[in-house]
Image (cartoon, rainbow, N blue to C red):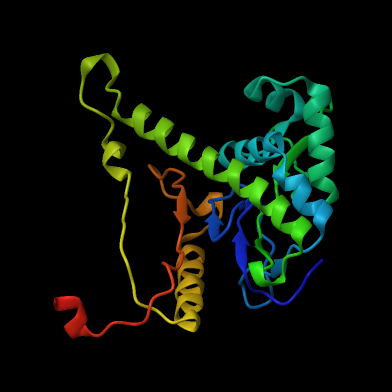
Amino acid sequence: MPKKPGGNKLGPETGVGTGTRTRTDNGAETRSETGTRTRTEITELDALKALAQPRRQQILQHLTLHGPATSAILARALDLNTGATSYHLRELARFGFVADAVPPEPDVRRARWWRAVPGDRRFPPPSRRTPELRLVMAELNRHAYAADLALFEQLQRESEEAPDGGSPDEWADGHAYSRGELRLTLPELRAFFEEYIALMNRYKRPGAETPPGARTVHTRLLAFPGPGTPTTTETDDAS
């Protein structure tokens, strides 16, 4: 159910989690006439429950990382049976998170191919969440954060494993990580968030325009306010 933009963002584009989650997508993007992604806020409880299911998060992540797939391909990749993946795909399609995809080549078996649907999808902010919605969001975030950490550790470990005892892949230096603190007002934090989304969109491009040697780069932004304390002055900081 589209609402006024605000709150948290979900990218796939599964974007799952509080704050921002954006990904490089392999499918076509839905954009407004100005070329920017159309924003929607996910307020329907059943839609959020569909996303909170761990297997569906895995399916969305696989489609986002590897492109369109059939239920059989997903079943093999995720160690599920095709009946389970077909059911999860139908549930995701019911809320517009996945859609039919064109097979990469003529498929003699006429299998159904699926793709992740990208978009600027956002969650309602905590101040507008019902108690039941808070429970669903907590479950969704718990699985999403765990999956993000596992993926980061896996890809970092694989990039550092030198084949045949040689030098690590040059992309081993591509694991950028930053920690920091800012003193911001709430409006400034919201502006910071939107500038981050704009930066992400600036670097997004269709697969046909991707230069040789490019790889999918996973990005995550986690920004949160510290404990409520009075604003200190520069003199206070230096003491």
Q: Residue at x 77, y 19 (%)?
A: 81
**Foreground residue among 227 and 95:** 227
The image quarter in which residue 114 lies: top right
Looking at the image, how many numbered discs can be counted on the residues? 0
Q: Position of residue 65 (x, y in %)?
A: 56, 40
What residue sits 45% from the left and 63% below the top? 223
Q: Is residue 96 visible?
A: no
Tell me residue 100's x, y (percent).
79, 43
Q: Residue at x 84, y 33 (%)?
A: 87
* Residue extending furthest toward the top: 164
Quadrant (top left, top right, bottom left, bottom right) of the N terminus: bottom right
Q: Nearer the viewer, residue 118 or 140?
A: 140
**Residue beneath the point at 35% across and 77% down:** 183
- The answer to whether 216 is drawn above or below residue 33 in the figure is above
Q: Position of residue 15 (x, y in %)?
A: 61, 53
> Which quadrant is the C terminus positioned in?
bottom left
Q: Measuring from the top left, give residue 164's x and y in whole percent.
A: 26, 14
Does 15 appear above or below 62? below
Q: Is residue 70 left or right of residue 34?
A: right
Q: Is residue 73 above or below residue 95?
A: above
Q: Is residue 190 left or right of residue 171?
A: right
The reply to whether residue 222 is visible in this rendering is yes
- Left or right side of 202 for 157: left
